[in-house]
Structure formats: C-alpha cells, structure tokens
Image (cartoon, rainbow, N blue to C red):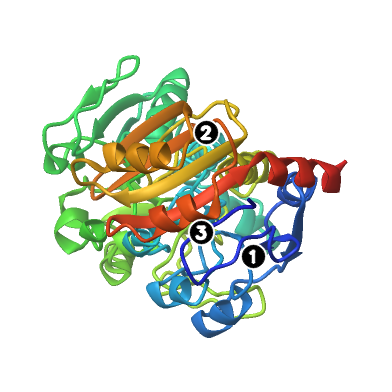
Amino acid sequence: MPDSSLPGTSSASDRGSRRALLLENIHSDAVSVLESAGFEVETTARSLGEDELRERLADVDVVGIRSRTHVTDAVLDAAPHLVAVGAFCIGTNQIDLASATRRGIAVFNAPFSNTRSVVELAIAEMIALTRRLTDKSAAMHAGRWDKSAVGSHEIRGRRLGIVGYGNIGSQLSVVAETLGMSVLFYDTADKLALGNARSCGTLEELLESVDIVTLHVDGRPANREMFGEEELARMRPGSLFLNLSRGFLVDHSALRAHLVSGHLAGAAVDVFPHEPSSSSEPFVSELQGLPNVILTPHVGGSTEEAQQDIGNFVASKLVRYFDRGNTSLSVNLPPLDVPEPAGPGRLLYVHQNVPGVLAEVNSLIAEHGLNVAGELLGTRGEVGYVVTDLSADPPAELVKALETLEVTVRLRVVSQAARTSQAARTS
C-alpha cells in the first residue's frame, strides 16, 4: 500500500508525485536536495499572505519558509496533504506550532546553521560603533578628512552583556573573549558559562554592569517588548545596544529617545517589529536618520555560507521525515532518530498522548496477522509518536482500523512498494 494519512487526504504516491513549495528565496541547494528525493519543487522569492498561501498549499506535501511568511491555523486547515513545514531560519514563532501538532504536521528549523554569521555581524557592528566608523565614512563621503581619535575606542577591555545565552549568545561569548572583552550574560534558564564569562542573577544586574548590551533571545510571546524605557534607562551612560534577534523585543520609540538624548552612544538593529514582505516594499522605522545607529535589513544569517548550510540542513530533515519518519530535531513532534526500515511496511503514527495506545496498536497489528519487526515510541506534551516496522505491507483494513481510533492524530504508511517506486522515479 502507498503512503497514507488521515481519512479525506490522499498520499503523494496516490497523486502521482510529491510536491514542495519553497518561499522567500531559499537557497538553491534545498531545491537540489528535494528534487533528488523525487519532489516537484515550486519556488518564489517573496513571502505569501494568508489567502494566497492557503491557495498555493492545496496540493503540497512540504512547504519551506523563512521569517516573513506566517503559517497560521487557517493556512494549515487549507493544506490537507501537508506533512511537514521547514523553517529555513532559526525562529519558528511565525508558525502556529500548536495547530501543526494537532494535525500531526512536523515542523523543522535550523537552530545552528547561521550561528556563526550572526556572531560575526554582532562583532562587526560592535567594532564599527566603538570606532565610530559610520561617522568617519559619512564624513569621507561628504569630502571631510577627519583623523581625530576623539570618541574612537578599542573593544578590547570592554564589558559585553549578552541577554540570552543559547547557541548564538554562547558562541558570541567565546569570540568576544578572544578579542579581549569581558563577558557577562543573563538567561532565564540555567546555562553553563563558557570560558571566563560570568552569569548575572538578574537582567538589571547585567544592564548596570556592561558597556555593550546585545539581545539573543527567542521569539516567544512573553518576550514581546522585553526591552523598553525601564530597561534602557538602566543601561550605563554612553553604552551601546544591539538587537539581532527579534524585532518585537524592543520599544523603538524608547530606544530612539535614549539615542537622541545621548544616554546611549549608539545602536545596531537588524530586526524590526514590522518588516517589508519584499524588496519592493518601502522600509519605515523610527530609528532612521540617526547618525549613531546602524540599520541592517534582517541579514544576521544572510551569508552565502549560512544560507547554503540551512538549505541543505532543513531540506534533508524534510526528506528524512517524509520518507522514513525521522523527527530528530523537530520542534513540535516527539524526536525520534529512526533507522532504515526493518521490514517491508512502516507505520508512522501520531496519536494523543494517553495510556494504552501502543498496546492497542500492536493488538490491531496482531489481529491482522502481521509481526512487529521493530518499534520506537516517543512522547512530547499532548502527542505521542510511534514508528512501527512490519513483517509485510499493512493491509487496507489495518490502516482503516488505525485511522478510526479515537486517539489518532495522523497516520502515514511507508511501504516497500512505495520506496521501490520512488527509487525508480529518482534513478
């Protein structure tokens, strides 16, 4: 039997092809990975609004997005064949993860691929602001030759405060130390300090102790406007502020006021509360026109190296989930690193996380005369995920019985026949 899912949906094999839609100018390596796995790939350089996305996903199996496209509950409701969503970036707050989980749709992102690129941009901006390179460049373009060292400093010996000590914050800590900076950090979770970095017990302690503050936190709703008038006022006079994480973390009106007053010596901002959906749409910000501010168009991870790595990484995750059921590093489904199938048929079963499900599944398998060749179970929150290899392709009656269980969220079947047919199409 070919791939199957919940009643009312057909499989990629039933429809004659597997289809992928990649938005927002995702790297061409992602296209190559998906095409090599037999996908018909459609691409576009722009993000899509909800209505257009609903229309485009009507017959798509996997979709790839970056930060500007929002995959809402309404979008997922209009995508009956959708198996997985790939966020070709770090953040996933643009995806309704709860809705995806309820539908058994796996979501993958790239939590590590652009880390170095963001770190290098942060270091470059710290040096540019500390050396007043933007002022020097503007003066040169205006025909003024100003060699004065007034206001220009080294970053060596400066105290860097990192808010958020995850993948990016911790690597930034290491690089900053090699440049001679002293590093303090604050994170709501207990994190191991790297090198000589020191953890601060409160955000207030960090703000009052450092010369440069840089944000590297995630996009959870609780972090919205975590940096406003009170936090900016606590920063030391003449300090610098960087935000390369999420635009809605910062009250830009308050930030502008502290820059104009001279309380802050400068800022570098790469992310904004409202960002254009394409390069043809105008950009507007309260921070425009300030000489001591570096503005960049959300390019923290936009290096060719990072985008190529992200393209390969996320596309490969989508293929492994589609073909094998591997959920390793999924952000919403139970993470299972599954081996090659141990039998002709494989069941990929997402279900409600309640007691007795595995026993009921195996009882149905036995009733239909099949043996279990291998089995893995994982749970995460309200859902469980079982990968079961069978001694033969499951009959339609078994698939129907599993689909109609009250606890079923989503069922897919990967059979030997489907794998053989797919191999023939891609060879």
Which residue lies under the disc numbered 3?
5
Nearer the observer, 20 or 184: 20
> Left or right: 391 with respect to 398?
right
Category of crowding for the residue at label 3, using alpha-carbon neighbours closer than 10 angstroms: few (below 14), some (14–19), many (at least 20): many
Nearer the observer, 190 or 176: 190
N-terminal of the two: label 3 or label 1?
A: 3
Which residue lies under the disc numbered 2?
390
Q: Residue at x 61, y 59 (%)?
A: 138
- Amino acid identity at mark 3: Ser
Q: Up-down: is 312 above or below 143?
A: above
**Helix, strand or loop for disc 1:** loop
Which residue lies under the disc numbered 1?
23
Give x and y (percent) for residue 81: 56, 66
> Left or right: 302 with respect to 206?
right
**Helix, strand or loop for disc 3:** loop
Answer with the quarter of the image where residue 207 lies: top left
Nearer the observer, 55 or 129: 55
